[in-house]
Structure formats: C-alpha cells, structure tokens
Amino acid sequence: MSSPLVLMDAASLYFRSFYALPESMTAPDGTPVNAVRGFVDTIAKIVNDRNAARLVACLDADWRPEFRVAALPSYKAHRVAESGDAEEVPDTLTPQVPIILDVLDAVGIATAEAPGHEADDVIGTLVARETTAPVEVVTGDRDLFQVVRTTPTPAGVLYLGRGWAKAELVGPAELAAKYALPEQNAGRAYAGMAVLRGDPSDGLPGVAGIGEKTAAKLITEFGSLEAVLAAVHDGRDRKLTTKARNALIAAEDYLAAAPTVVNVALDAPVTQDRDDTLPATPADPDRLTELTKRWGLGSSVPRLLTALERRAER
C-alpha cells in the first residue's frame, strides 16, 4: 500500500502531550514546553512508525462554531470561561501553542484551518478531498471515527486514547466490530449512534433511555439514523419498540438539531499554508536552530529531523 496522508488533530494531540509530560520540562527562561516537546515527538513517531509521506497539522479556527451553537446552544457550553467567549485552557499551555506553530513553520510541515470551523471539519474535508492515497487521522478524540471509509481510498483513525504505546488503527471493520455497527457504512453509522447516545463532554444530552448499545442496535437494525427517525412515525413498522419510539418522540427537537453538531463538515473552506509533502530538511534551518535553543527543544527537534531524513532515504 502507498504511503498515507496523515492528518493530525493538533489541539487533541497537544492537550494530550501537555497532560502526559511534566511541566518541569522548561525552556531556559523557565517557560514550560512539555506540550511543545510532546507534540514534536509525536510527529517524529508518526514519521517513523506510519511511513507517512504527507502530513497536515489540522487546527481549530473556532473551537465552538456559531453554526453548531445555533443548532444546539448547549454545545460545549460548560467549557466556556467566565468571560463567555473562550475555552478553559491551562495557563501554562496557552503560551506553548504559538511555539508549536513556529516550529511547524520552520520545519516546513503544513498546517490547515477553516474559518468558523473546528479541526474536525478540516479533517473531514481533507479526507473527503483525498482520492489518491490512504488516509490516517491521528487523534485522541472518538468523534473522528465517523470519517473512516474504504473508498475511494481507505481512511482510518489512529486512536491515541490510551497513549502511543496502545494506539489503535481503527478502520471500518474495527469500528463495526467495536460498536456492533454495520461495516459497509461504519463511519456514518457511528455518527448516527453518537447522536442517539449523546456526549456530556460536548453538551450533547442524547436521547433519554438510549445508551450506546441500544443506539448501535437501532442504527444496525434500521441502517441509518435517518431510517430510525423515519420509523418513529410509521405505525406499520413494528421493529421499533414502544419504549424506544416514545423516547425518540420526546427528543424530537434535539434529534432535529444534533446531526448538525455531530457530523463533521465535508466541504469546509479549508486553507493550507503549504504543500503537505513532508520535507527532507527544514524549510528555515536557521530559524529552527534559534527556536530549538531559545525554547530548549533538543532532543525533540533533532529527533524529528532525523526521522524526516530517514523517511526521505527510504
């Protein structure tokens, strides 16, 4: 199989790095750089272990897009800071994000974002656009399971929910087996299950009385969320129990709005700062040397550069 296009869920990965590594990892001036070093090390692991030829770090232009809030005001509402317009981010992580972006730019690794959209939407759109190479999405967020596919090229999710050592590559077959969903449309089925199940961490209440197993069973039995909802008012369809039908009727307003929130965009206005081909050498070596020294990033940056050199030699 040809080398994959790797799409990194950047915020998910630098949050994971921040919490996985101690804040005692600091620059010479005392600034914590644990998220920076962990993120750079993650890229090196991807290059070494996944045989990536192309890579894009996908960014949140808006972590709580207006179109999702308009559909469901509770979406991520509990994450809004007292100011009302920003996500609660640890004080020592916030200053590290610009450093990460500076390093990516100096190395020559592509970043992408879409105005008014989340990184999930950037990833969904880039997956939808790709027609030549297999795609691997690297994330710690299960929401992105919905992008798995078999055609026109395979797309899977390298899920880091339990860390790199226990990373799982989840494609349609693995997703179907894990959640008892139909394999032929596992990604879309997962999104439908997620609507019914809900997700308190994102402010999605779900349908009362319908947990993950029942949601998966309904999606599998009817084939899609749309078919489940169509059966609610079809008195001739006896596959839907009275209890489930009543629960779905009671949640009609939520069910009308939730797909807009749960489904990733496939046509977001993505802008990318450069070609996604991984460089063999840094785009700006002098600046990268300065950043490495200023922020105390050796051995992480040298490790990444070695990985890129070896990748180019294969």
Image: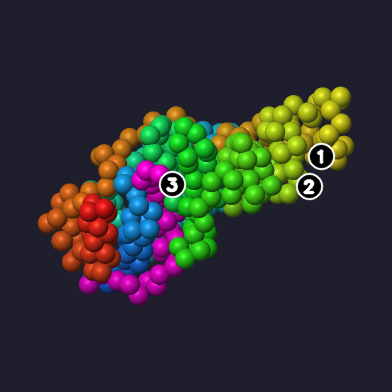
In which quarter of the view is residue 218 placed? top right
Residue type at mark 3 is: Glu
Front residue of 25/145: it is 145
Residue type at mark 2 is: Gly
What label does residue 209 carry, if any? 2
Measured from the top left, where is residue 211 in percent x and y? Answer: 73, 49
Task: Give the label, 2 or 3, closer to the camera.
Answer: 3
Instruction: Pick out the residue farthest to the bottom.
Output: 24
Front residue of 245/7: it is 7
* Residue placed under numbered mark 1 in the picture: 244
Its colouring scheme is: rainbow
Q: Which residue lies at the image location 37% right of the left edge and 43% below the top edge?
A: 2
In the image, is residue 208 above or below residue 47? above
Front residue of 175/256: it is 175
* Number of disc labels: 3
Measured from the top left, where is residue 69 in percent x and y? Answer: 55, 38
Circles 2 and 1: CB atoms closer than 8 Å:
yes
* Residue placed under numbered mark 3 in the picture: 136
Q: Earlier in the sequence, mark 3 or mark 1?
A: 3
Q: Which residue lies at the image location 15% right of the left edge and 51% below the top edge?
A: 284
Q: Which residue lies at the image location 31% right of the left edge and 46% below the top edge?
A: 53
